[in-house]
Amino acid sequence: MIPIKFFNPQEKQELLKHLKEQFGVNEIPWNLAKWGKERIIILPKEISKKEIESIDDAGRVENIGLYFAKEDIDGVRLSIEGSNLLKNQITKNIFEMDEKQLKNWMLGQQLDVPTEKRGFLVMKYKDDFLGTGKASENRITNFVPKSRRLKSKEI
């Protein structure tokens, strides 16, 4: 079974520091845990750590939490849900897509665009936040899971 490790206040502050540097985020109002080596999940404050541990013994604790982000050597990569939960706080490293880029992104394709920024960018179309991509010199790598990609070019 994959172990769960609850964030202590210092670990939560360290994550917040990274999110502030990357995206301008000032607050993480949830309990957090690390599931496995990299995945960060949000847990409801109403459930105690002891209750969560007993649930984890019976099944996957991720089913009561929400996949929020993943720690990477290059920073924190927000999930689609994580970017939406923080959208009112995200103020920097945002890539605004046009309609054509949105279609390609939702099909799981990388975006072949030059960008001055490097590292993780929050992908946005109008008011919708669509997770993060990783920018290099001439492309933004797509992390939309295959199971969540559109199957057809018809949008």
Image (cartoon, helix red, strand yellow):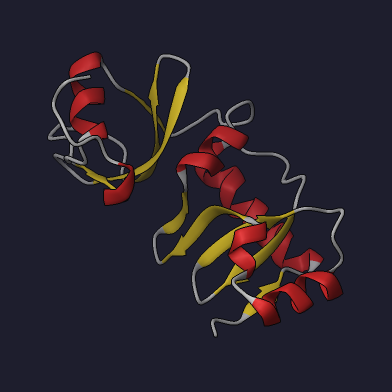
Q: Is residue 143 visible?
A: no
Q: Which of the image's four quarters has the N terminus?
A: bottom right
Q: Nearer the viewer, residue 42 or 120?
A: 42
* Residue at figure coordinates x 77%, y 45% from the top left: 29
- Where does the image place residue 5, in percent across and percent down from the top left? 67, 76
Q: Is residue 104 left or right of residue 49?
A: left
As drawn, 12 above or below 147? below
Q: Which residue is outermost to the front?
A: 58
- Where does the image place residue 119, in percent across and percent down from the top left? 34, 48
As drawn, 127 above or below 63? above
Image quadrant where residue 10 sits: bottom right
* Residue at figure coordinates x 26%, y 50% from the top left: 146
- Where does the image place residue 115, in percent across and percent down from the top left? 23, 33
Q: Nearer the viewer, residue 134 or 126?
A: 126
Q: How many marks?
A: 0
Q: Is residue 34 visible?
A: yes
Image quadrant where residue 58 sits: bottom right
As drawn, 97 above or below 150? above
Q: Which of the image's four quarters has the C terminus?
A: top left
Q: Is residue 132 left or right of residue 153?
A: right
- Where does the image place residue 61, in percent across and percent down from the top left? 64, 68
* Residue at figure coordinates x 69%, y 82% from the top left: 57
Q: Nearer the viewer, residue 137 or 42?
A: 42
* Residue at figure coordinates x 26%, y 16% from the top left: 98
